[in-house]
Image: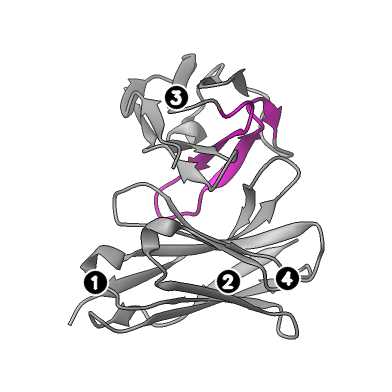
């Protein structure tokens, strides 16, 4: 299996901050990397697919970049509704997920 | 609007079989454009892919579950099902069904709300 490692595991930020979350794959996955947001008690919601494509309906403050083994999710200006957990997932082979990053209010 | 809804027992005894159904509405499970799958999330932990099925019946399972998994599809009812045998406390989790896009690898674009299954005697 391809292992996905996210960092940090949690972070504290304020409304309006720029937030960056990284995801590293244990081997090259080209651009087969997705990002999901999950709020407590809810199912994950697809934000970004193939590393940098914004899912329909997702605000443009979310962006993704990277290829190969290193990827980044950026929230350009954190909004109150963005406090949640974020997961990366590789879709190169059998799907595997990162352990998650919890974004909390500072 | 596509909707997925999981259903099944919320409590299963150790060594028994967990059985869940996912009903798809607002779209056809027989669409050639999509696959369908199951994912689980133990309380407070990360996500684990369980398996994937195509409407034709082709399946792909997570090898880590050591052949305990059976996924099936009933196109007449627009449903997919999950059976997990010989469960232990480690199988306690929220179980989600989801639709998979295949144009960009396996990407989960629609999810059910999830159902908590607790394994306990």
Q: Position of residue B48 (x, y in %)?
A: 42, 52
Between residue A104 and residue B77, name the one nearer to us.
Answer: B77
Disc with the residue nearer the chain's start (2 vs 1): 2
Q: Quadrant of the N terminus of chain A?
A: top left
Q: Which residue is mark 1?
A: B88
Element on which disc 1 rests: loop
Question: Mark on residue A24?
Answer: 3
Q: Position of residue B76 (x, y in %)?
A: 75, 85
Side of B74 where A95 appears, left or right: left
Q: Which residue is mark 4?
A: B55
Residue contact at pointers 2 and 4, CB within 8 angstroms: no
A46 falls in the magenta region: yes
Callout 4: chain: B
Same chain for the residues under marks 1 and 3 in the image: no
Question: Mark on residue B5?
Answer: 2
Callout 3: chain: A
Residue A38 can be seen, yes or no: no
Side of B116 where B20 appears, left or right: right
The tally of labels here is: 4
Element on which disc 3 rests: strand
């Amino acid at each position: 299996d391809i292992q996905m490692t996210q960092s940090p595991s949690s972070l504290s930020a304020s409304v309006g901050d720029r937030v960056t979350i990284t995801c590293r794959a244990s081997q090259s996955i080209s651009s087969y990397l997705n990002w999901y947001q999950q709020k407590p008690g809810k199912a994950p919601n697809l934000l970004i697919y193939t590393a940098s494509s914004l899912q329909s309906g997702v605000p443009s403050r979310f962006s993704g970049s990277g290829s190969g083994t290193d990827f980044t999710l950026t929230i350009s200006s954190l909004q109150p509704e963005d406090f949640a957990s974020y997961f990366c997932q590789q879709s190169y082979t059998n799907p595997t997920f990162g352990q998650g990053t919890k974004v909390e209010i500072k | 609007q596509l909707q997925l809804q999981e259903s099944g027992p919320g409590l299963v005894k150790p060594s028994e079989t967990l059985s869940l159904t996912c009903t798809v509405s607002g779209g056809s499970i027989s669409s050639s454009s999509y696959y369908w799958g199951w994912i689980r999330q133990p309380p407070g932990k990360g996500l684990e892919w369980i398996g994937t099925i195509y409407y034709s019946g082709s399946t792909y399972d997570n090898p880590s579950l050591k052949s305990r998994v059976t996924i099936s599809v009933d196109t007449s009812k627009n449903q997919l099902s999950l059976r997990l045998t010989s469960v232990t406390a480690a199988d306690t989790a929220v179980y989600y069904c989801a639709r998979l896009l295949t144009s960009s690898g396996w990407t989960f674009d629609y999810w059910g709300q999830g159902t908590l299954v607790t394994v306990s005697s």
